[in-house]
């Protein structure tokens, strides 16, 4: 019983104070952000509307 308590306490400490470890570097660090053209912005907005509508429908199921 005391062993279980110590184990759970140890798990809690690890969750609270452990530093996250990255398994690999971010692959997008070398990609430069570019401005979208007005047509690209319009298309992106349209696609996000469709995506949002799909999410709402999926939640209704």
Image: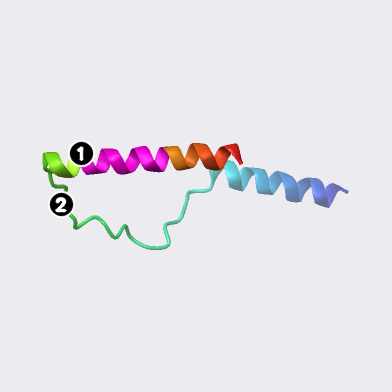
In magenta segment, residue 12: no
Mark 2–mark 1 distance (CA, rounded to whole Å): 21 Å
Q: Position of residue 51 (x, y in %)?
A: 40, 43
Q: Residue at x 71, y 44 (%)?
A: 9
Q: Which residue is mark 2?
A: 32
Which residue lies most toward the bottom here?
A: 24
Q: At x 17% / y 44%, what residue is drawn?
A: 40
Q: Residue at x 85, y 47 (%)?
A: 2
Using the image as rendered, state which of residue 34 and residue 43 is in the foreground: 43
Local SS, label 2: loop
Of 36 and 20, the residue lying toward us: 36
Residue where numbered disc 1 is placed: 42
Residue 8 vs residue 46: left or right?
A: right
Q: Secondary structure at mark 1?
A: helix
Bin the neighbour count of mark 2 within 10 Å (Cα to Cα): few under 14, some 14-19, many 20 and up: few
Mark nearest the camera among 2 and 1 is 1
Q: Earlier in the sequence, mark 2 or mark 1?
A: 2
């Amino acid at each position: 019983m005391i062993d279980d308590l110590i184990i759970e306490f140890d798990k809690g400490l690890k969750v609270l104070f452990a530093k996250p470890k990255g398994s690999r570097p971010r692959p997008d660090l070398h990609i430069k952000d570019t401005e979208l053209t007005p047509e690209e912005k319009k298309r992106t907005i349209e696609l996000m509307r469709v995506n949002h509508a799909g999410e709402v429908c999926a939640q209704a199921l």
